[in-house]
Image: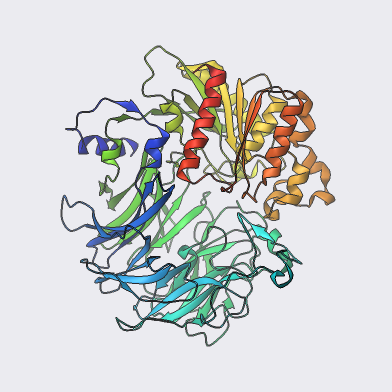
Amino acid sequence: MKHLLLAGIALAFAAVPALARDLTIQDVATLSRVGAPTVSPDGRWLVWQQRETSIALNKGRYDLWRLDLSKKGAVPEKLVADGKANETSPQISGDGKTVWFQSDADGSDQVWTVAIDGGKPITRTVIPGGISGFKLSPDGTRLLIWTDRDPGARDLHDPALVRVPGGENGSGRVYDKLFVRHWDSWSDGRRSQLFVVPVEKEGRLALQGVGITGELVGDTPSRPFGGGEELAWSPDGKTVYFALREAGRIEATSTNLDIFAAPADGSAPPINLTADNDGMDNLPTVSPDGKWLAYFSMKRPTYEADRQVLMLRDLATGQTRALTQDWDRSVASIAWAPDSKSLYVTAQDTQEEPIFRVDTKSGKVTRLTQEGVVSAVVPTKTGVVFSMNSLTAPDDFYRLSGTKTERLTSVNAAKLAGIDLPKVERFSFAGANNDKVWGYAVRPASLAEGKKAPIAFIVHGGPQGSSNNSWSYRWNPAVFAGAGYAVVAVDFHGSTGYGQAFTDAIRNNWGGWPLEDLQKGLKAATDKFAYLDADNACALGASYGGYMMNWIEGQWPDRFKCIVQHDGVFDARAMAYETEELWFDEWEHGGKAYFEDPAAFEKWNPVNHVTKWKTPQLVITSEKDFRIPYTQGLAAFTALQRREIPSKLLVFPDENHWVLKPKNSMQWYGEVLGWLGKYTGK
């Protein structure tokens, strides 16, 4: 599929003469980004949101686009594009005539509509303080709105004023339980809650709405990344299903999202459908015939990377069964086939994330796509429309009909014309425990035959993640290759897409098997690929990868010419008390708090080995990172300076665990590539 992606770009612009050049971060920062696809019920129209980035304004802006799927050779065209607003989250009405969407054109996010044939957009809601998101009911008569309100809010009447606890007597925030902050924001006491708003006739604005989350205290969708995929309407519009983790004093140590059912008219409190499971239940998805509720379930409490098993609940009887219990993969997304007889899911599988079909009767799993990471799936009566990316191509749209895959868009063809993208090659080796471990090497496109390239050895975060075949707007291997570095990445023990036992193997083992895999993997790569300059390598990593950089400093100190450490754990003891999602850190070290079992944390603690540090290190951190607070980066930099090791500190005051702003991203690459160049001679 990767070759299909590249071929599509090449064919689209084969007639455009250009001198080939390497990819840069400036190219990546300005690429168009597609997302949130939706297809009209008759299968004719594909509508999506598309981001365009302004370097001058240092931000992106979203428009709505459409494509006529009934016309061969049709090209995408803008549907709504207000240059001063963001249009997102398109949804098409049941009759296929109207596109509902979210826009901030009036100063706050509200619901708007536009005819699918085009025309002037119309405001449909005026909700105080705006909304976070919405879902149109199947019959088009109501909107499911989510926005922040005080717990137990019965309607949307109260303005969404931002309050600071204790603000009447000063600026101090006052708390008596966790969370006090989450991801990149401090708690102000409000929760993301659900309200059902009636759709008024065109020309009349919907102002009110009834709250349906009742007395539950928690966020739905979940913070910080949950969205509409965690909510679902029943086909008859009478019931709303949603995922929520009840808060209280256990919120910071619990992964127990449950799935609730609530009447859309607010006439009764929500009912917990998954109360018997203390692990996570999420992604409620109702079958088109209204008979079944699909969702995923994790069995083990407090473990956020447990296997996500596809579950099926008979909505008439309440009986539940596991469809994919015998399939050792983790379901990442769920969509029903139009006939309600099967489901389309995505799941990581050995550096890819394909689409699979799951039969509802037998549970049989059939793989439908091969190479590439599928990021969205929309089943239609004429095939499955999906978006997909790879290490060498950003997202575009495709249609799968039977076994045939058809490319629908090439949104970045013009921007990528004349750019040579690198070659990606996979390899495997016997890693720790003699298990098979996978990795990849990326060869710079401009590297001459017989020449060698310095190595950027990139370690992924998570740690339950993967250096997979996906495009990234942050850590992009093609950008490193464009700067002349050969990238090597290894999916060490703890990575996802290789079965649950492989993922579980990192628990109580942070600096053990993963380091052994990295050591053996780098040697396997340099033995296999002659273009890798084995004696000229730097190591880089963020989050868990950043932790590994600090661990490598003390455990593998003579291998690399330099290190780049981004948002990594330096002191496990401090991390145990500073991070916000305590369930993660405690699970990884055996399931106890630091004060209950300090030895489990100290066993793999980088701070205990600072006396062995010697490799020059660039430290990167951000002030809004509450996951691995910037104090960890400051401490690492202090250790380097006191050891008189060449070191540099880059601090972003306006970023969180990720660097997202365009100018900051370019500064990040400038500093990182400059650091690598200083020590590799590139």
Q: Position of residue 89 (x, y in %)?
A: 38, 63
Of all residues, the one furthest to the top in this rendering is 450
Residue at image x 47%, y 41%? 663
Asked if residue 590 can be seen in this view, the reply is: no
Which residue occupies the foreground of this view, 636 or 108? 108
Relative horizontal placement of residue 90, taking residue 588 as reference (left or right): left
Q: Position of residue 492 (x, y in %)?
A: 59, 35
Which residue occupies the foreground of this view, 672 or 135? 672
Which quadrant of the figure has residue 549? top right
* 452 shown above or below 104: above
Q: Quadrant of the N terminus?
A: top left
Which residue occupies the foreground of this view, 421 or 101? 101
Asked if residue 440 can be seen in this view, the reply is: yes
Mark count? 0
* 305 shown above or below 569: below
Q: Position of residue 380 (x, y in %)?
A: 29, 62
* 412 shown above or below 477: below
Relative horizontal placement of residue 224, taking residue 293 as reference (left or right): right
Q: Position of residue 130 (x, y in %)?
A: 47, 71
Relative horizontal placement of residue 336, taking residue 427 as reference (left or right): left
Which quadrant of the figure has residue 164? bottom right
Q: How is the image coloured?
A: rainbow
Residue at image x 83%, y 45%? 598
Of all residues, the one furthest to the bottom in this rendering is 267
